[in-house]
Image (tube, rainbow, N blue to C red):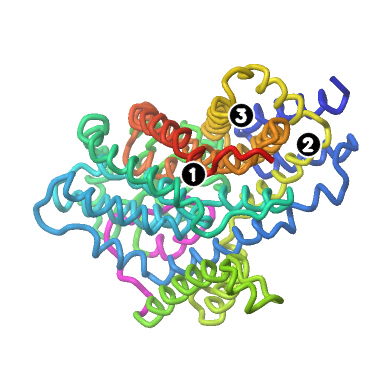
Amino acid sequence: MSFEIWFVLLTLVGMLLALIWDKMRPGMVLFTVTALFLCAGIISPKEMLEGFSNKGMITVALLFLVSEGVRQSGALTQIINRILPQGKTTVFKAQSRILPSIAFISAFLNNTPVVVIFAPIIKRWAKSVNLPATKFLIPLSYVTILGGLCTLIGTSTNLVVHGMMIEAGYEGLSMFELSWIGVPVALAGIIYLFLASKRLLPEERKDADATEEEVETDERYHPVEVVLGARFPGINKTLKDFDFKRHYGAEVKEIKRNGAQITRSIERVPLAEGDTLVVMADDSFVATWGESSFFLMIANGKDTPSRSNKKKRVLTLVLLVLMIVGATIGELPVTREAFPNIQMDMFFFATVTTIVMAWCNIFPARKYTKFISWDILITIACAFAISKAMTNSGMADLIADYIIGLSHNYGPYVLLAILYIVTNVITELITNNAAAALAFPLALSIANQLGIDPTPFFIVICIAASAGFTTPIGYQTNLIVQGIGNYKFTDFVRVGLPLNIIVFLISIFLIPLLWPFEIH
């Protein structure tokens, strides 16, 4: 092997270890790796920066703002309140209304705001109808992931693969192309959750009594749950070193982590990303910190009236529908012929929708940078450079040769399965966009060496990189519901691993039928 291959291989191993170690945000880890490739002469400055101007990456940024507009309009709150059954019901009956509806919504919106809004509402609703919230919160996270598999904009991973396909000279994915595999997978996943919820999901784990006692002594304060994000300044510090009450005006009463509830000596416990803190706060806490990037979610202990008006909600939903329909129609040949100078794709309509939302004050335009997850965008941009380094160094071809050699007698079906497993394992350990970045050059090299159409391999990356069900760290929505539902790590393994296997089997069976291994 050449120096370039060894350098890229060792650097990527170091990258994986750094991401698993989780002492630095994924964006900075990947940016460091691209800088090393630049210093070694494996990629040029132009190749390092290409990802930052990629249409797929910028579309992700725009969709963050569109999702924020939908969130702030109050439309999602209105929708979930209409979906939730009132009065006496059962887990199965409630799930039959909730899960398909949420899967449909998440096919067109960023998963995280959907879970952030729905999770506390569902938890309060479950308590009001005497059902365990634990039967709904993991399914909530899973169906948002399943719904995201169904469209191009359902998850950032799909847009990343779409962008890489265009960079490699392919046409890319249409708005609903992934629906052919995403819808069957989502339906199978929802049916599995219907059947598995009773046996595999845990019963309610009661919150500690400390907060309830505090509520009785002072009616001004009520319990609020906050999920700590990566930007929270007290990460890896104890409450003794980081005065939460001085910073945020609320007192920490409990720390929830991996299904455990810590109420004693909490001032000595180092805080970690994904921890859920139960704090005693007044009404000003949510108003002040509800949109803070320090917290992944703030779940108020009581209902708060929506500040949005009906006109804004209607306008928001109209804009969202126009964006989806416009991007779908814009891909038709007749539209391309009618408007040869305008590429009316998802980027075009997401741009128009974002601008209209900003000028109509659906989201506060002065704070628009606050609503974009910059770490995800940097991760995506650097993913393009890492993919290019794997190709330039010859590492992708070398690994493809090795994989093809292992399955020489079994054909592309086994290669597809191997690629799925590799991509999915990386997703569960680190992050979906990094998994797509590492898998894409391998897919392209395998297809080129076999002389077949690489599209089936690209599609399998979209599915495998998003199917993070087995661990809470595999997908941010899992991390959010872990604390608010008092779930243990093993709860995700018990429910998620069979779902991972179901998605794997359906994908490996259907993808070659829908996108055949055509010889080039």
Density class for disc 2 (Cα within 10 Å; few <14, some 14-19, many ≥20) is many
Q: Position of residue 498 (x, y in %)?
A: 36, 29
Q: Nearer the viewer, mark 1 or mark 3?
A: 1
Which mark is nearer the camera, 1 or 2?
Answer: 1
Of 158 and 298, the residue lying toward us = 158
Point out residue 517 in the picture as x, y percentages from the top left corner.
59, 37
Cα–Cα span, label 1 and label 3: 39 Å
Of pointers 1 and 2, the one earlier in the residue sequence = 2
Callout 1, which amino acid?
Leu
Can you say which quadrant of the picture contains the N terminus? top right
Question: Judging from the image, what secondary structure is the residue with disc 1 in?
Answer: helix
Residue ID for mark 3: 21
Do callouts 1 and 3 mark residues in contact (Cβ within 8 Å)?
no
Query: The disc labelled 2 sits on which kind of residue?
Result: Thr
Residue 391 is labelled as 2
- Please state if 269 lies on the left or on the right of 491 as rendered: right
Q: Nearer the viewer, residue 491 or 380?
A: 380
Is label 2 in a helix, a strand or a loop?
helix
For residue 80, what is the image quadrant? bottom left
* Residue 67 is one of the magenta-drawn residues: no
- Left or right, 345 with respect to 505, comes to right
Q: Residue at x 30, y 52 (%)?
A: 100
The residue to which callout 1 is attached is 514
- Foreground mark, 2 or 3? 2
Q: Which mark is residue 416?
A: none
Q: Of the two numbered discs 2 and 3 on the same chain, state the one appearing first in sequence.
A: 3
Question: Where are the magenta residues, as a range?
Answer: 284-309
Q: Residue furthest front?
A: 519
Distance, label 1 to label 2, CA atoms, is 28 Å
